[in-house]
Amino acid sequence: MQNYFAVTFEGDYVRVVSNGDKDHEVATNVWTEVVRVCEVNHCYRVFGLASSTTPIEVLDACDHGRFFRDLGVDSKYRMARVETNPEAVDIAAFVETVLFNRGFPGRLFDDESDALEWLLSDNRVSH
């Protein structure tokens, strides 16, 4: 499947819509643009809405901590994600755990409104 992503600044947060197959190259393209939009707008709250037809491989997921550090993503970022494909939720939850264990504040949600409520809250605790 062809990949599609869009990164937009929504005033209080950066919105990322990403559909299709996921791999390291797709993640690099998406997150390079996310970092650019965050830096331009001085906004580090990121909401991701994904429909992953083929989720990222486990080995690539394990490398997300280093991958984020290399891109300049650090603790000032706050990330909320919704994965709409039930078959991709397990790997998305694994990525969430990897990132949390490496100090990145982010959560996976089932519902877009819950994700945005958490993202826009002042509570900096990730879980």
Image (cartoon, helix red, strand yellow):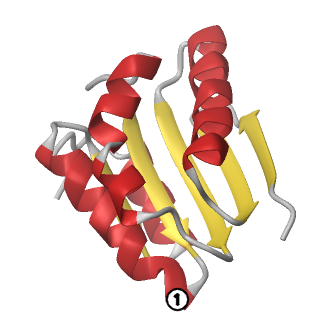
Front in this rendered view, residue 109 or 88? 88
x then y, percent, for residue 57: 45, 64
Find residue 27 and report its horizontal and vertical position in percent: 58, 44
- On screen, 74 above or below 92? above
Q: Nearer the viewer, residue 29 or 14?
A: 29
Residue 46 image offset from top left, x and y in percent: 51, 40
Judged from this view, the residue extending furthest toward the right is 2
Q: Is there any visible trace of residue 102 in the rendered image? A: yes
Q: Quadrant of residue 107?
A: bottom left
* Quarter of the image where the N terminus is located: bottom right
Left/right placement of residue 39 relative to residue 97 reads right
Tag 1 residue? 87
Residue type, numbered disc 1: Glu
Q: Quadrant of residue 97?
A: bottom left
Residue at 70% x, 37% y is 10
Q: Nearer the viewer, residue 31 or 42?
A: 31
Q: Residue at x 39, y 19 (%)?
A: 70
Q: Residue furthest front?
A: 59
Image quarter hosting the C terminus: bottom left
**Could one spot residue 77 in this view of the protein?**
no
Q: Position of residue 118 (x, y in %)?
A: 36, 56
- Residue that extends furthest to the bottom in the rendered view of this protein: 86
Circle 1 SS class = helix
Q: In this image, 67 relative to 48: left or right?
A: left
Say left or right for 62 vs 116. Answer: left
- The answer to which quarter of the image holds residue 74 is top left
Q: Is residue 120 above or below residue 82?
A: above
Q: Residue at x 57, y 12 (%)?
A: 39
Q: Residues within 10 Å of mark 1 (few under 14, many from 20)?
A: some
